[in-house]
Amino acid sequence: MMLSGAPAFATPRAQAEASTTESVVAMTQSASGRWHVKVLSTTTPLKRGPQRFTVRVSDAANGKLAQGLELRVQPWMPSMGHGIEEKPRVTSRSDGVFEVSELDLFMPGTWELRFTLAGREQDTASVTLKLGR
């Protein structure tokens, strides 16, 4: 059965810092080139199953964390042509810092996290994650 879960969505609200034990597991630049997007995890190497990530979005021009952005996340497994049915939880921790949790990447292999960055303008970004068993 093909599943294509709708993207999760969050708006800025709570304040918190990313854990100091997190490592960058993926990074990219947004489609417009305006934003740098980093995905961090306390678990490396990544394995199939429940995931929790911190996503940090910063201005590509000056490195400052993005202000006033909302983040949507859609997990996608390209080789299988589907996403996941359950929406991951996206919580804003501070300007430009989001926690993505309740995300079950249930199969080993290559997954994409497809991001929509919404604010004054909308932008997109995507990172590739390789998950082991």
Image (cartoon, helix red, strand yellow):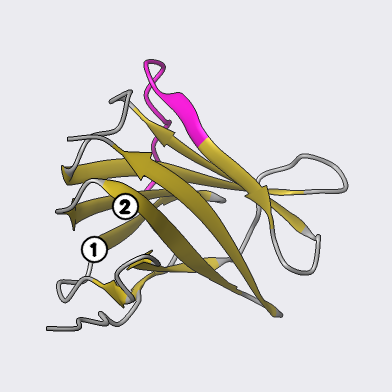
Measuring from the top left, give residue 2's x and y in whole percent. Answer: 19, 83
Q: Residues within 10 Å of mark 1 (few under 14, many from 20)?
A: many
Q: Bounds of the magenta span?
A: 14-25
Q: Residue at x 30, y 48 (%)?
A: 109
- The residue at which mark 2 appears reads as 100
Distance (Cα) linking label 1 and label 2: 6 Å
Instruction: Tell me how many marks there are.
Output: 2
In the rendered view, tell whether residue 124 sits above or below residue 50: below
Which residue extends farthest top? 21
Q: Main secondary structure of the magenta part?
A: loop
**Helix, strand or loop at disc 1?**
loop
Q: x and y percent of residue 49 in the render?
A: 13, 45
In the rendered structure, the answer to whether residue 73 lies left or right of residue 118 reads left
- Disc 2 crowd, CA 10 A, few/some/many (<14, 14-19, 20+): many
Residue reaching furthest to the right? 61
Look at the image and tell me whether residue 12 can be seen: no
Residue drawn 44% across and 34% down? 40
Q: Tell me where residue 19 appears, x and y as whole percent.
A: 37, 24
Left or right of 129? Residue 70 is right
Is residue 111 part of the magenta span, yes or no?
A: no
Residue 127 can be seen, yes or no: yes
- Residue 88 — which label? 1
Q: Mark 2 or mark 1, which is nearer the start of the sequence?
A: 1
